[in-house]
Amino acid sequence: MNDSKIEQDELLRGFAFRTSFVFLLLLTIPLTGTYYRQLFKTDWSHFQDVFQAVNYVPKFFIGSDWGFGSFSGWGIALIISLIAAYFWGFLVKDINQKEPELYYWLRVIVRFRLAIALLSYGIIKIFPVQLPGPTLSDLHTAYGDFLPWKLYYLSTGVASAYYEQSLGAIEFLAGLLLMFRRTTIIGAGLATALLVNIVLINYAYHLSDQLYSVYLLILSVFLLLYDTPRLYNLLVKERRAKPDEFNPAYKPKLKLPLKFAVIVFAIFFSTITYANYRNSNWPYPNTPGLAKAAGFYNVESFQWNGEQKPYSLTDSLRWVDVVFEKWNVLSIRKNINAPINPVSPSLTFQKNGLGDYESKGNAGRFFYTYILSGSKLKLTNNNDPTDTLQLSISRPDNDIILLNGVDAKHDSLKVSLKKLPKEYLLQKGRRKKVSVY
């Protein structure tokens, strides 16, 4: 190979390094004012706020939340990186001699950025708050009435053998391994294997973390590529591995503060997440529902503006069945699909435990949050605040609920509900004998 070819290859390699350096920094360092405004509002007692603070999504302007449109900001970052790399090569002398040191510090930044993300995601799976199990309403919703992301959340939430916790433990372990330079390749290998699967899941089920999962995968592959050739030479070719070209000239004790800070964060975040898991019903409301009412109810009779509505498979006004949850939410099934909330959930704190997680991704039922005052019920649709019901409630016994009142249009309705003694095989367990008759 002639000298001009070698020189050309060196120029291209140097340009690629400088572009990658600027590009990864642009994606890793928060550059939007929105992030810092939100950071100063963070309530550090809420695990949701802390999670949002440490999981910055590299997004330069508001656009599509999923699909290829969500990467438009990265295109701008790449253009900036190419321009910066071009002028950097002219303005900075002896840039090639400084590349090993810059490469080292870039890997440090990427290592700890990825470690914090994996630790936080691992913790919310070990204490399963990210993927909660199904509600009674979910168990009475047809499979085809769920959006794909809701199917993934529910199926993963009910998986046996501590599947969700096992995923979290692997993520947590990968994060710990990334904190130490000698185990970086093991942590990066674990992270890459996990993140490839996570990226595919995000696209297959239309989850909301498509952009962020690809970003984390890029970080893990970046770390993996550095050590893979040396590992290949050592284990496959049985040759001596090339040592690092740069070792920082500082005392070992100066390495500790950053690692100590990450460990303190992991302990702190684990503590507040566990406290929420034990003491809160998140992502479902914390307010208790009607006493001894939780269950599945058949609509025995239904009157609309004084007109008796018989059982029907086509009547869009008549209720088919009702589910009372243990908290202050009930869901109604009709012969029409509910307007669906297509937005997939995010870990955000909502005051008083109010949330709409259960109604998101579900087109099979109409979800209402209710306020009980004596014998009066006020119902508000979780997806449409203008859809309200003002009802009087009476209970001749624990299995019968009588409702009488008006809706938002002042149409009157009178409903008789009867609780059915339903048993759910999912709750009976999968290791015991069950009878289906």
Image (cartoon, rainbow, N blue to C red):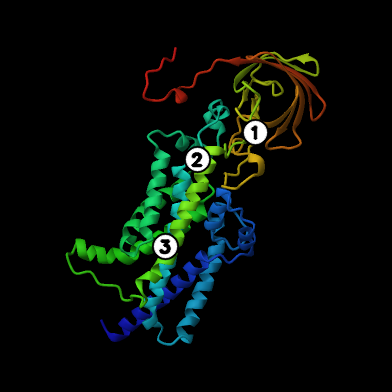
Crowding at mark 3 (Cα within 10 Å: few <14, some 14-19, many 20+): some
Q: Residue at x 25, y 63 (%)?
A: 231
Mark before the other along the chain sequence, 1 or 3: 3
Q: Nearer the viewer, mark 3 or mark 2?
A: 3
Q: Amino acid at mark 1?
A: Thr
Q: Are marks 2 and 1 in contact (CB under 8 Å)?
A: no
Q: Quadrant of the N terminus?
A: bottom left
Pick the residue in front: 315 or 271. Answer: 271
Q: Are marks 3 and 2 in contact (CB under 8 Å)?
A: no
Q: Quadrant of residue 361?
A: top right
- Residue 259, numbered label: 3
* Cα separation between marks 2 and 1: 21 Å
Question: What x and y, as percent, mark residue 193?
Answer: 36, 51
Q: Residue furthest right?
A: 410
- Residue 131, numbered label: 2
In the picture of the structure, the residue carrying the numbered disc 1 is 287
Q: Look at the picture and state if 247 lies above or below 280.
A: below
Question: What x and y, as percent, mark residue 30?
Answer: 56, 65
